[in-house]
């Protein structure tokens, strides 16, 4: 486990005494007490509609390299207004309504995990609240095969995260929420029939700041945000309804060593920003 989350993730584990003071998690439906650490002792395969594990206040779940399978249920459930931590150690969450579900104003730290074939990979009850709603920190996370968006949360900080082949869209934050990312890859998302009708995005947020970001080949706008700041990144091959749109912003994107094909102006649709290769006027 890397230290990118700083003391918030590492201190949770250390203070809880992992592994000596850890609780075994061996059956679906368990609830971890407040400030505890639970460790999977094997794969959890739950009955349809069941919640695999509920996390109490400031508690931590270590998948220990095992998998959670929760068909039509919930993989991990985080209580409102509190911090919860999920460490995969190479494990996976699969087939759930949501791989991880956050109640109002919860804060999730999640690392070293794959979330596959869920309706939503990570879903916050108050995802539309970008000021005081739920927030997620991710590191070394893969989300793939979601029928809705891979991630739908108010505010996001991400490092070394891959969102691929999620038919309902990639990373969807609040329209006033901030997304900060390093090493984020978002590709092949937003392919569902609904997305083709109403329009979906690879990334949507109030503001997006990224470095070493790759957003390619999404069947929707690559990045839709009021303000985009990008460095050392590639945003190409994204299109909505047959129209190529890699960036769609309210303000001129701030780009440094970025490869992109088209940056459209949301407030003046007839004029692109003139910062990408095929913007009109270039």
Image: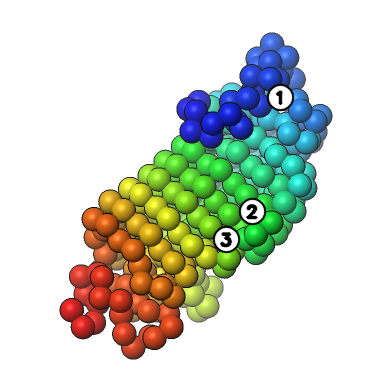
Query: Callout 2: 10 Å neighbours few (<14), some, many (20+)?
Result: many
Please provide percent x and percent y for residue 104: 75, 53
Name the residue carrying label 3: 177
Q: Which circle, 2 or 3, is nearer the viewer?
A: 3
Please provide percent x and percent y for residue 203: 46, 61
Q: Nearer the viewer, residue 3 or 61?
A: 3
Q: Alpha-carbon distance for marks 2 and 3? A: 15 Å
Residue drawn at x 75%, y 25% is 36
Quadrant showing the C terminus:
bottom left
| Label disc, if present, on residue 37 of the rendered structure | 1
Q: Nearer the viewer, residue 150 or 176?
A: 176
Please provide percent x and percent y for residue 181: 44, 49
Residue drawn at x 54%, y 31% is 6
Name the residue carrying label 2: 123
Query: Callout 1: 10 Å neighbours few (<14), some, many (20+)?
Result: many
Q: Alpha-carbon distance for marks 1 and 2? A: 22 Å
Q: How is the image coloured?
A: rainbow
Upstream in the sequence, badge 2 or badge 3? 2
Name the quadrant containing residue 85.
top right
Residue drawn at x 35%, y 67% is 253
Is the C-beta separation of discs 1 and 2 under 8 Å?
A: no
Q: Nearer the viewer, residue 100 or 79?
A: 79
Query: Callout 3: 10 Å neighbours few (<14), some, many (20+)?
Result: many
Q: Can I make out residue 52 in this image? A: no
| Label disc, if present, on residue 71 of the rendered structure | none
Is the C-beta separation of discs 1 and 3 under 8 Å?
A: no
Determine whether the residue tagged by mark 1 lies in a helix, strand or loop. Answer: strand
């Amino acid at each position: 486990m890397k230290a990118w989350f700083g003391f918030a993730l590492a201190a949770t584990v250390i203070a809880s005494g992992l592994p000596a003071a850890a609780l075994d998690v061996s059956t679906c439906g368990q609830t971890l007490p407040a400030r505890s650490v639970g460790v999977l002792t094997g794969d959890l395969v739950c009955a349809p509609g069941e919640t695999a594990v509920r996390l109490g206040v400031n508690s931590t779940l270590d998948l220990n390299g095992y998998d959670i399978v929760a068909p039509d249920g919930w993989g991990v459930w985080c209580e409102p207004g509190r911090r919860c931590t999920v460490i995969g150690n190479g494990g996976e969450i699969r087939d759930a309504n949501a791989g991880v579900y956050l109640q109002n104003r919860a804060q999730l730290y999640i690392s070293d995990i794959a979330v596959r074939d869920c309706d939503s990979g990570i879903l916050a009850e108050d995802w539309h609240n970008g000021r005081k709603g739920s927030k997620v920190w991710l590191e070394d996370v893969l989300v793939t095969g979601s029928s809705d968006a891979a991630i739908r949360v108010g505010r996001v900080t991400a490092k070394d995260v891959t969102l691929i082949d999620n038919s309902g869209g990639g990373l969807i934050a609040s329209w006033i929420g901030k997304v900060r990312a390093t090493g984020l890859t978002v590709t092949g998302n937003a392919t569902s029939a609904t997305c083709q009708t109403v329009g979906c995005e690879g990334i949507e947020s109030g503001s997006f700041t990224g470095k070493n970001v790759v957003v390619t080949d999404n069947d929707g706008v690559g990045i839709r945000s009021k303000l985009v700041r990008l460095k050392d990144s590639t945003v190409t091959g994204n299109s909505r309804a047959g129209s190529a749109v890699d960036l769609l912003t309210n303000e001129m994107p701030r780009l440094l060593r970025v490869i992109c094909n088209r940056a459209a102006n949301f407030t003046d649709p007839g004029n692109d920003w003139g910062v990408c290769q095929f913007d009109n006027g270039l």
